[in-house]
Amino acid sequence: MASKNVIEIKDDNFQQVLSESKIPVLIDFWADWCGPCKMIAPVVEAIAEKFKDKILVGKMNVDTNQTVPGRYQVISIPTIVFFKDGEEVERSVGFKDADELSSFIKENL
């Protein structure tokens, strides 16, 4: 599910990604069976391209990775969580179009 601008994040590399990133990290928590997750996937890809020098974008499948989503109480998906300096700053739950997601990022940069 990852692409050139979106990295795959798993339970075992989550902490490393957050601690090594010099820029904020946006993580899309998703699952294969989730319709809204499939709808937002191309939006996340476009955002990753648009903000590629400002944020690191990752995707975490909640079915194959349950520790991190549990720790961050990700109940509904898609949930997009914005991290700065390794700490959660803000989150967005449900489908967002490109304009809404861009605004969300700009507000938290």
Image (spheres, rainbow, N blue to C red):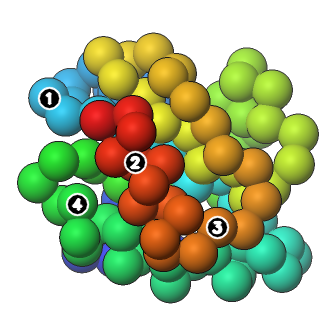
Q: Residues within 10 Å of mark 1 (few under 14, many from 20)?
A: some
Residue appearing at x 40%, y 39% in the figure: 107
User: Distance of mark 4 from mark 2, alpha carbons?
Assistant: 9 Å
Q: Mark 1 = which residue?
A: 22
Q: Mark 2 = which residue?
A: 105
What residue type is disc 3 on? Lys
Q: Helix, strand, or loop for circle 1?
A: loop
User: Distance of mark 1 from mark 2, alpha carbons?
Assistant: 16 Å
Q: Mark 4 = which residue?
A: 51
Task: Give the camera-side residue of 78 and 70.
Answer: 78
Q: Which quadrant of the structure image shows residue 90?
A: top right
What residue type is disc 1 on? Lys
Q: Helix, strand, or loop for circle 4?
A: loop
Residue appearing at x 52%, y 21% in the figure: 88
Residue appearing at x 77%, y 59% in the figure: 94
The spot of residue 77 in percent (x, y) is 80, 55
Q: Which quadrant of the structure image shows residue 40?
A: bottom right
Residue 60 visible in the snapshot: no
